[in-house]
Image (tube, rainbow, N blue to C red):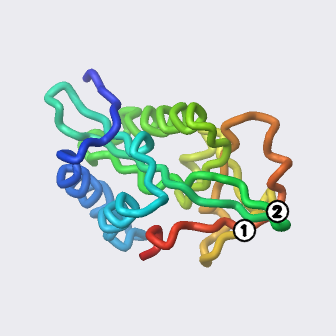
Amino acid sequence: MKLKLRQERLSDHSAIAALILGAYRDISYSNHKEQIMVERLRNSDAFIPALSIVAENDNQDLVGHILFTKIQIRNQGQSYQALALAPLSVDPRYQKKGIGKKLVLEGHRVAKELGYNYVIVLGIPNYYPKFEYQFISKFNVSLPIKISAANALIVFLIKNNYLEITGGTVIYSEAFFG
């Protein structure tokens, strides 16, 4: 299967919502409202069009989507621009074929191009470390919500730049949580 990655279009919105619903349908930790969060984020200042990326198959069907939005990490009176990765969605019929990996890596590439260094994800602890994500607790970074330390990870897209944010609090857009 040939896969095409591209920025989402307005005409993709309903297909993305359906894709997200299908991807999270059987996920026990999901609130099954990820598609609503995506719509809120699209309509917020946190949205970066270039970082809402879809994967199309040979038939031009959407089989994957990833979204990165603006957040901040505040530490000792300074704010560092960062991104939140959420959600990553792959049609269940196409999972375990490397589509999620391609979306994550493309998102990282675009984020670096746009000058971002930090990405936070609230996700599966055995999936994201293969992309060099590390637990945020290692860097004394905290979240504004209660979540298991095993599910809060960060990646530094520009290597050897992590020391500047040892410590701090992640500040999400209001649209992230509704």
Does any portion of residue 151 appear in the rendered image?
yes
Quadrant in the picture for residue 50: top left
Report the side of 95 relative to 103 (left or right).
left
Amino acid type of disc 2? Gly
- State the CA–CA distance, disc 1 to disc 2: 7 Å
Does any portion of residue 26 appear in the rendered image?
no
- Residue farthest along the top direction in this orientation: 2
Q: Name the residue located 46 percent from the left edge and 68 percent from the top edge.
A: 176
* Nearer to us in this view, 147 or 12: 12
* Nearer to us in this view, 121 or 123: 121
Badge 1 marks a residue whose secondary structure is strand
Q: Name the residue located 27 percent from the left edge and 46 percent from the top edge.
A: 91
Q: Position of residue 174 (x, y in %)?
A: 49, 73
- The residue pinned by badge 1 equals 169
- Residue farthest along the front direction in this orientation: 45
Viewport quadrant of the C terminus = bottom left
- The residue pinned by badge 2 equals 167
Q: Is 62 placed above or below 58 here?
A: below
Q: Name the residue located 44 percent from the left edge and 70 percent from the top edge.
A: 175
